[in-house]
Amino acid sequence: MMEAHPEMELYVGMDVDPTALEIGRGHIEAFLADREPNGGELRAYTHVKNFKYIKQVLGSVDESLVVGLCGVDGILIDLGMSSMQVSQQN
């Protein structure tokens, strides 16, 4: 998503699975390291939280995201389970 939208200035990722979030964070860090210096400023945050806490998480990143001053331009939610998570179940 970050590659497809170079205009993006802020990315907030959430997942309840700390392993999945850590893997995602590795991809984010690699993407940010490979960006061209003039690629614009992109801030990226990740949180181990359930999506029901999205307002709390956004407020902790930037209060203006939840008080109507700035808002959010888009939200992408994946509510499914990955094969990695299923195979870890005993």
Image (cartoon, rainbow, N blue to C red):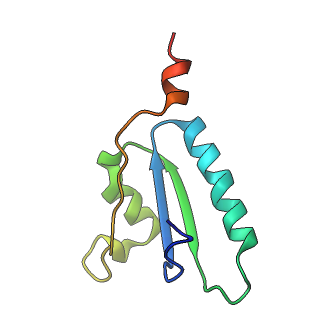
Residue placed furthest toward the bottom: 38
Q: Give the left or right position of residue 32, taking residue 90 as reference.
A: right
Q: Is residue 52 above or below residue 27?
A: above
Q: How many marks?
A: 0
Viewer-proximal residue among 12 and 69: 12
Rendered residue at 46%/66% (across/down): 61
Rendered residue at 54%/80% (across/down): 6
Rendered residue at 51%/79% (across/down): 9
Rendered residue at 65%/85% (across/down): 39
Q: Quadrant of residue 71?
A: bottom left
Q: Give the left or right position of residue 86, taking residue 30 as reference.
A: left
Q: Quadrant of residue 20?
A: top right
On the image, the x and y values in percent for residue 14 come to: 45, 50
On the image, the x and y values in percent for residue 37 come to: 74, 85
Q: Give the left or right position of residue 29, taking residue 17 as reference.
A: right
Q: Is residue 44 above or below residue 81?
A: below
On the image, the x and y values in percent for residue 21 come to: 56, 44
Viewer-proximal residue among 10 and 89: 89
Q: Is residue 51 above or below residue 39?
A: above
On the image, the x and y values in percent for residue 18 come to: 56, 37
Residue placed furthest toward the left: 68
Q: Give the left or right position of residue 14, taking residue 35 as reference.
A: left
